[in-house]
Image (cartoon, rainbow, N blue to C red):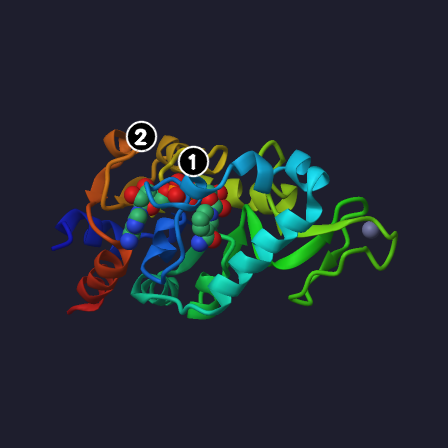
């Protein structure tokens, strides 16, 4: 049962912003990072998701990302992804800010998606920034022969500037802000729901667990996004 004030806020909203994290893809079979059986429990982040790790052993890093790409290519978007694509078509203006690198939102039909941590599909030249979207890992840049790397944001790296500026701008205009399937620990993305609240948005968290954001959210819909979000869409579209 979705609280009545959540549905009311959504019915009145001009602009809805959604921040998603790894939890949204958990029901598709993609491991999250910080849960006890998550990816970081098995691997050392600094060896796999940092420039130091890449320079020390580019093959190992490329292999790991090739493996993750293979995993996300072999799974399907779940009911939560589909519900968010449906929500985009039900409200006047909608921005989906995702920390996920798996492209499952786009595959479910979401259109206005800002990937603040990049994605697993593209590779980028580490020297000149040229982006190869060929879905395969070239080792060297075609332009400057610099080393190609996954187009994801690693520890210690800045977020893609233009994408981040758009995410902040959308967040400031939000009437309703969702934080879904994210442990709300990775900044600056985790700061967006607070920014939205400061600008008057109604903040809704969707997560089976509590996070640092929970005490600040106006509503906490406790449960898996693949269950909660379809329920929300059916209540929103009910007469
Ligand atoms: P996280 O692993 O830190 O947190 C996942 C959150 O999802 C937890 O709070 C957990 O309680 C919640 N969760 C678990 N199952 C859920 C479900 N069925 N429905 C809703 N919520 C559920 O993930 P994060 O906050 O996204 O931060 C981790 C970083 O890892 C991000 O930067 C992201 O780029 C990256 N990452 C991406 C993917 C992906 O693209 N699918 C996978 C793992 C990690
Ligand atoms: Zn280059």
Q: Are marks 1 and 2 in contact (CB under 8 Å)?
A: yes
Please state the horizontal and vertical placement of residue 57, each as a whole percent of the image: 69, 42
Residue on which the image places disc 1: 190
**Is residue 178 shown to the viewer in this render?**
no
Residue at the image point whose x is 39% and y is 48% from the top: 32
Residue on which the image places disc 2: 212
Query: Which is nearer the N-term, disc 1 or disc 2?
Result: 1
Quarter of the image holding residue 82? bottom left
**Disc 1 within 8 angstroms of ligand 1 (CB):** yes
Q: Residues within 10 Å of mark 2 (few under 14, many from 20)?
A: few
Comparing 111 with 27, the one in front is: 27
Instruction: Pick whichever, 195 or 39, lies toward us.
Output: 39
Residue 171 visible in this rendered orientation of the protein: yes
For the residues labelled 1 and 2, the Cα–Cα distance comes to 10 Å
Can you name the residue that lies furthest to the right here? 144
Determine the residue positioned at 44% across, 62% down. Answer: 105
What is the crowding at mark 1: few (fewer than 14 residues within 10 Å), some, or many (at least 20)?
A: many
Describe residue 61's horizontal placement relative to residue 98 as left or right.
Answer: right
Lateral position of residue 29 relative to residue 111, left or right:
left
122 left or right of 145 in image: left
């Amino acid at each position: 049962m979705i609280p009545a004030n959540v549905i009311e806020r959504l019915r009145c909203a001009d602009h809805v912003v959604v921040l998603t994290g790894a939890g949204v893809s958990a029901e598709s079979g993609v491991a999250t990072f910080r849960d006890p059986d998550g990816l970081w429990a098995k691997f050392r982040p600094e060896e796999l998701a940092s420039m130091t790790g890449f320079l020390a052993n580019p093959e190992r890093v490329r292999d790991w990302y090739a493996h993750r790409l293979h995993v996300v290519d072999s799974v399907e978007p779940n009911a939560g992804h589909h519900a968010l694509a449906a929500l985009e078509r039900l409200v006047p203006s909608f921005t989906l800010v995702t920390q996920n690198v798996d492209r499952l939102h786009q595959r479910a039909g979401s259109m206005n998606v800002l990937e603040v941590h990049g994605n697993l599909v593209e590779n980028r030249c580490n020297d000149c920034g040229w982006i190869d979207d060929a879905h395969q890992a070239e080792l060297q840049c075609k332009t400057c022969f610099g080393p190609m790397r996954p187009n994801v944001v690693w520890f210690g790296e800045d977020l893609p500037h233009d994408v981040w500026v758009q995410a902040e701008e959308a967040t400031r205009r939000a009437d309703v802000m969702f934080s879904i399937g994210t442990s709300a620990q990775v900044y600056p993305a985790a700061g967006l729901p607070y920014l939205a609240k400061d600008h008057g948005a109604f903040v809704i968290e969707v997560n089976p667990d509590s996070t640092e954001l929970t005490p600040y959210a106006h509503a906490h819909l406790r449960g898996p996004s693949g269950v909660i979000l379809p329920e929300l869409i059916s209540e929103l579209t009910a007469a």
